[in-house]
Amino acid sequence: MTSVVIILGPPGAGKGTQAVRLAAEFGLPHISTGDLFRENLSNETELGELAKTYMEAGKLVPDEVVIDMLFGRVAQDDCTGGYLLDGFPRTVAQAEALSDRLSEEWTTRTMQLDVPDEVLVDRASGRLLCKGCGNIHHEQFKAPAKEGVCDACEGELYKRADDAAETVKERLEVYHSETKPLIQYYGERGMLDVVDGSRTPDEVYTDLRALLTTSKASEQEVT
C-alpha cells in the first residue's frame, strides 16, 4: 500500500518541525502548503497572485486554490510512493477532495498535535527570527547568547508582525472555527491519532515516529 501522512494542529504547534524529521526518516516528500504558496508567489503564477490576496488579509486561501496547487505537486514522480502533508487539509471540503483523488490502494494516516491555546500564544509571541539565515530563537525557551543577534550567523533577530499575541489569537480563532472540524472528520473514520504537542520537540517526535513505524509494519503485513 501507499500512504499519505497528514499532520494536523493549530498555528505554532510544531507541525513543520516534526514533518521535516518524519519525512527524512521515512523517505517521504514533505509537502507544505506554505512552501507551495511561496513557490507560486515567487514564480508569479496566477494561483500565487490569487492566494496572496487572501494571505495578506489574514484569511484562509479558498479550497479550490489550495487544491489546484497541491495536486499539481503530488502529480510529480517523487510522490508516487507516498507523501507527507503539512498544512493540508485545513477544511473538511479539502479532506473530501483528497479522499476522492486517492485510489483504494492508498491509505491515509492522520496525526494531530494537541496544544493548548495559551501555550501557542506564549510560543509565538516570544519567537525571534534571523534576517540572515532564518534561524529561530525564542525569548523564553531558546534565548540568543547575545541579545538581538543570531547564534548561528550573527545576523539581526526580529519578530514577525503575525507573531504578536493578538494576531496569534485571531489565527487560532480561525483554526478552531474552520479547521478543527477535521478532527471530528478523521476521528469518526478511525483515521486519527492524537499526540500531546505541548512537550519538547524530541518527545513529540518519539510518539509520532512510533505511530508511523506501527503503521508501516501493518501495511507490510497486509501486502
Image: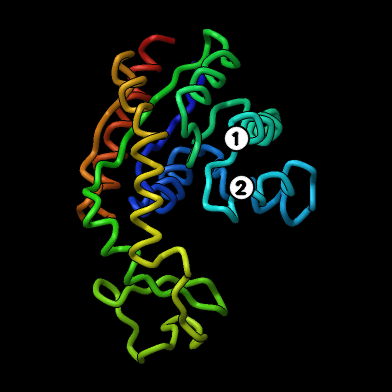
180 vs 56: above or below: above
Tags 2 and 1 touching, CB below 8 Å = yes
Residue 211 occupies quadrant: top left
Quadrant in the picture for the C terminus: top left
- The residue depicted at 53 percent of the width and 46 percent of the height is 59
Q: Residues within 10 Å of mark 1 (few under 14, many from 20)?
A: few
Q: What's the amino acid at mark 1?
A: Pro
**Residue under label 1:** 62
Q: Mark 2 highlights which residue?
A: 54
Q: Position of residue 128 (x, y in %)?
A: 40, 75
Which secondary structure, mark 2? helix
Q: Secondary structure at mark 1?
A: loop
Residue drawn where x is 21% and y is 43% of the image: 196
167 sits left or right of 39 in the view? left
Q: Residue flagged by tag 2: what amino acid is it?
A: Tyr
Q: Residue 32 appears at what percent x and percent y?
A: 54, 44
Q: Position of residue 168 (x, y in %)?
A: 37, 58
Position in image of residue 200 (x %, y %): 23, 57
